[in-house]
Amino acid sequence: MLEYSALESSSKWKSLPSPPGFSKSSTASSSRAAAKKPSASSSTATYDALKEKRAWDVAIAPAKSLPMQAFMLYMSGGGVQIFSIGIVFMLLLSPFKNIAGMNEAFAQYAPSNSNPRSLTTLFLHKIVYVLCNMLTLAVGLWKCRSMGLLPTGTGDWLAFESRGPAPDISLL
């Protein structure tokens, strides 16, 4: 067995000052502070505040990933190829999947005194989450329009137009 107490008293490093932010008196006071238990209500409130902050991170996550998705759309090109169609399909499908699984995404961040699967729990967070996903959907639809996949012109609807009867021409 090694005896470390003898090493501390005869150490050649003993004359060095303590590192910044460290002192032997602070370690003693921190051990006393650690012995005191914080109240249960304050720790629950702190934990709920931390969970709410994490819920905001989840709520704005779709908006944070939007620049990377826009770059991927730019790099896929404007033509109608399988690669660009796949990226656009992924971009259009992900907001619907995210909104469908919204309650599960926010369940772990619900306050301790509420139902985690309720729609009204973290309501503002969920509204922001839906809006960020709608923004992602709007970028996907813009890309579809720029690729010519959305019927936006009058020529796109010619198949549904009916012609009237031909006018009668009478010769006098």
Image: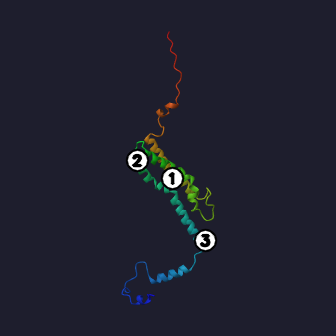
Q: Crowding near pointer 1: few (<14 within 10 Å), some, many (20+)? A: many
In-image side of 20 versus 96 (left or right): left
In-image side of 79 versus 61 (left or right): left
Q: Residue at x 55, y 63 (%)?
A: 52
| Amino acid at dot 1 | Cys
- Residue 62, given in percent of the width and then of the height, sits at 49, 54
When the figure is inspected, residue 25 is found, relative to residue 105, above or below; the finding is below
| Callouts 1 and 3 close, C-beta under 8 Å | no
| Amino acid at dot 2 | Ser
Q: Residue furthest front?
A: 1
Which label sits in the foreground, 1 or 3? 1
| Callouts 3 and 2 close, C-beta under 8 Å | no
Spatial CA distance of label 3 from label 2 is: 53 Å
- Residue 132's label in the rendered image is 1
Which label sits in the foreground, 3 or 2? 2
Q: Quadrant of the N terminus?
A: bottom left
Spatial CA distance of label 1 from label 3 is: 34 Å
**Label whose residue precedes the other's in the sequence (1 or 3):** 3
- Residue 4, given in percent of the width and then of the height, sits at 43, 87
Q: Nearer the viewer, residue 38 or 107?
A: 107
Q: Which residue is mark 2?
A: 76
Q: Which residue is mark 3?
A: 41
- Residue 148, given in percent of the width and then of the height, sits at 44, 39
**Label whose residue precedes the other's in the sequence (2 or 1):** 2
**Label whose residue precedes the other's in the sequence (3 or 2):** 3
